[in-house]
């Protein structure tokens, strides 16, 4: 068992906290076939033992936080594959598999469970250039009200299931990020606010989301002020992350988390087997993580493509606490 108040005390004491790495692409690497409609959400129906084993592997690697495999598991993600009626069941299953892994592998230390809520599948109509992907096409007719209702439903299910806090992992527009954050906050649980950013070729200004023209700074202060406890730069390349970090630090005095992606494209294509070369090695990732900690980043993990072999070295490589302020 764990207690978020205990994690909050550790953060207050400036302890360096390890988050797990990629969930979807780690399952893919383990041989779990992903759906072109609900991506890794399908694993909660037919590959439960693999999901639990993934969590166990990360716990054995020394992480402090594991993330539920619910990033693509809202009702609108499950509906196209005929599983809308299992929305509550599959999200609860995602929490219980994480809890079982913790009970089996972390009896001697606290491990916290983060419930993932995202805008996966809601990009159509909000950002240009992604309409050719089937899992975004599915929801082009979804109204804003339906989307926000679905997000709130999922957040409430995860809260009832017993997650310690919620990760608002929005990769789309700032408006969709608000939807996800507000859905998570409505549960009363602590919320970590995720910001996906990017750098366009030849430009040095940081944009939000995959393809939007909106500058990161445009609404950051407004969204960060909604009530979340941690700001996370996630699912962003190393370069975009490094460009975003000083912007976050200039407007946010609370704890910062970083969990980047590996700058590949094959993990959005479920019919390929991660053959694209990863642009960063585990050794380079460790060096970068040390630099982030030296700049005051307190929570380190990984997203798509940053898998177990990147996370395993961190426990021994990083300091136990942030440097003196």
Image (cartoon, rainbow, N blue to C red):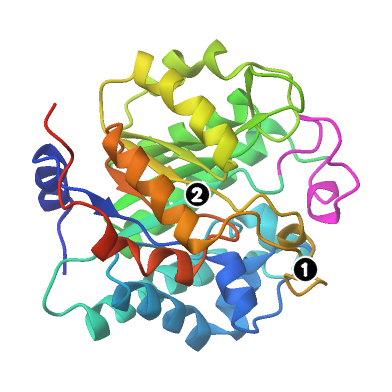
Relative to 324, 80 lies left or right: right
The segment highlighted magenta reads 122-140
Any mark on residue 270, and which?
Answer: 1
Determine if the magenta segment contains residue 136.
yes
Disc nearer the start of the sequence (1/2):
2
Is 141 placed above or below 3 here? above
Question: Which residue is drawn at the image coordinates 27% and 70% (left, top)?
Answer: 62
Neighbourhood count class around disc 2 (C-alpha, 10 Å): few under 14, some 14–19, many 20 upward: many
Is residue 11 visible from the viewing direction of this image? yes
Residue 211 picture location, percent across and down: 76, 30
Depth check, front residue: 313 or 2:
313
Q: Which residue is mark 2?
A: 117
Residue 192 picture location, percent across and down: 36, 40
Any mark on residue 125, and which?
Answer: none
Residue 76 picture location, percent across and down: 68, 53
Depth check, front residue: 2 or 283:
283
Question: Which residue is drawn at the image coordinates 58% and 41% (left, top)?
Answer: 236
């Amino acid at each position: 068992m764990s207690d978020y108040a205990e994690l909050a005390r550790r953060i207050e004491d400036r302890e360096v906290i390890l988050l797990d790495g990629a969930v979807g692409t780690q399952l893919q690497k383990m041989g779990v076939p992903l759906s072109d409609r609900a991506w890794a959400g399908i694993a909660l129906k037919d590959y439960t033992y693999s999901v639990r084993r993934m969590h166990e592997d990360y716990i054995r690697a020394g992480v402090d936080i594991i993330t539920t495999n619910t990033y693509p598991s809202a009702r609108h993600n499950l509906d196209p594959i005929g599983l809308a009626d299992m929305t509550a069941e599959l999200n609860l299953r995602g929490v219980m598999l994480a809890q079982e892994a913790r009970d089996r592998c972390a009896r001697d230390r606290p491990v916290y469970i983060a419930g993932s809520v995202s805008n996966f599948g809601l990009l159509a109509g909000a950002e240009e250039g992604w309409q050719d992907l089937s899992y975004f096409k599915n929801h082009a007719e979804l109204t804003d009200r339906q989307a926000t209702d679905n997000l709130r439903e999922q957040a409430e299910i995860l809260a009832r299931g017993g997650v310690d806090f919620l990760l608002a992992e929005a990769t789309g527009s700032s408006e969709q990020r608000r939807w996800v954050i507000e859905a998570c906050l409505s549960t009363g649980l602590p919320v970590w606010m995720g910001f996906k950013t990017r750098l366009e070729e030849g430009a040095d200004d940081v944009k939000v989301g995959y393809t939007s023209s909106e500058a990161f700074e445009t609404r950051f202060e407004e969204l960060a002020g909604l009530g979340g406890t941690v700001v996370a730069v996630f699912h962003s390349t190393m370069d975009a992350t490094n460009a975003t970090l000083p912007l976050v630090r200039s407007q946010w005095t609370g704890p910062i988390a970083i969990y980047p992606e590996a700058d590949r494209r094959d993990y959005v294509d479920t019919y390929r087997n991660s053959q694209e070369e990863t642009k960063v090695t585990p050794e380079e990732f460790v060096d970068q993580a040390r630099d982030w900690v030296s700049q005051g980043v307190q929570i380190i993990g990984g997203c798509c493509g940053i898998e177990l072999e990147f996370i395993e070295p961190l426990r021994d490589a990083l300091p136990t606490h942030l440097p003196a302020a």
